[in-house]
Image (spheres, helix red, strand yellow):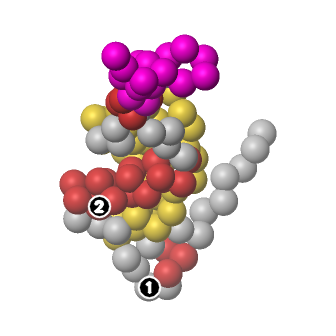
């Protein structure tokens, strides 16, 4: 006969529930998503991202905006930067990206 705990559950039941918990994907943080987006975009573009300007969880994973130096110039303020919108699935794999903006590093967005 199987051993029971004080609530009347057998060891097999407790192990089964723990096994079910272990199968759940770990909760991922925004910092993890930022690193994952930047690393995978670097692999695809061959250019190291300089920053992640936005990251947010969505129903099927994460979305992020990543800033990349596209063309280095002198002076540095005239270098060409680009913003890439990146989509990651729940496991952190990059499933889509697109360049959404190109701009000079020294350019400031103006609000109207």
Horizontal and vertical percent position of residue 103: 49, 57
- Could you give the CA–CA distance between mark 2 and mark 1, rounded to whole angstroms? 23 Å
Q: Residue furthest front?
A: 1
Q: Mark 2: few, some, or many residues within 10 Å (few <14, many ≥20)?
A: some
Residue at 54% over, 76% down: 77
Q: Residue furthest right?
A: 112
Residue at 29% over, 61% down: 42
- Image quadrant holding the C terminus, namely top right
Residue 61 picture quarter: top left
* Picture mark count: 2
Q: Foreground residue, 21 or 74?
A: 21
Q: Foreground residue, 68 or 2?
A: 2
N-terminal of the two: label 2 or label 1? 2
Residue 87 visible in the current orientation:
no
Residue 55 picture quarter: top right
Residue at 50% over, 81% down: 76
Q: Foreground residue, 53 or 73?
A: 53
Q: Residue furthest bottom?
A: 74
Horizontal and vertical percent position of residue 64: 48, 43
Horizontal and vertical percent position of residue 104: 50, 64
Residue denoted by label 1: 74
- Image quadrant holding the N terminus, namely top left
Range covered by the magenta-colored residues: 1-18
**Is 25 colored magenta in this rendering?**
no
Residue denoted by label 2: 42
């Amino acid at each position: 006969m199987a051993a029971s705990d004080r609530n009347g559950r057998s060891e097999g039941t407790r192990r089964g529930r723990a096994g079910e918990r272990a199968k759940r994907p770990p909760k991922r943080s925004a910092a993890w998503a930022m690193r994952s987006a930047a690393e995978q975009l670097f692999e695809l573009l061959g250019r190291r991202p300089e920053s992640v300007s936005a990251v947010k969880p969505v129903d099927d994973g994460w979305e992020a905006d990543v800033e990349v130096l596209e063309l280095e110039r002198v002076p540095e303020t005239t270098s060409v930067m680009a913003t890439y919108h990146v989509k990651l699935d729940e496991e952190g794999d990059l499933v889509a990206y697109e360049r959404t903006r190109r701009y000079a590093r020294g350019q400031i967005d103006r609000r109207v």
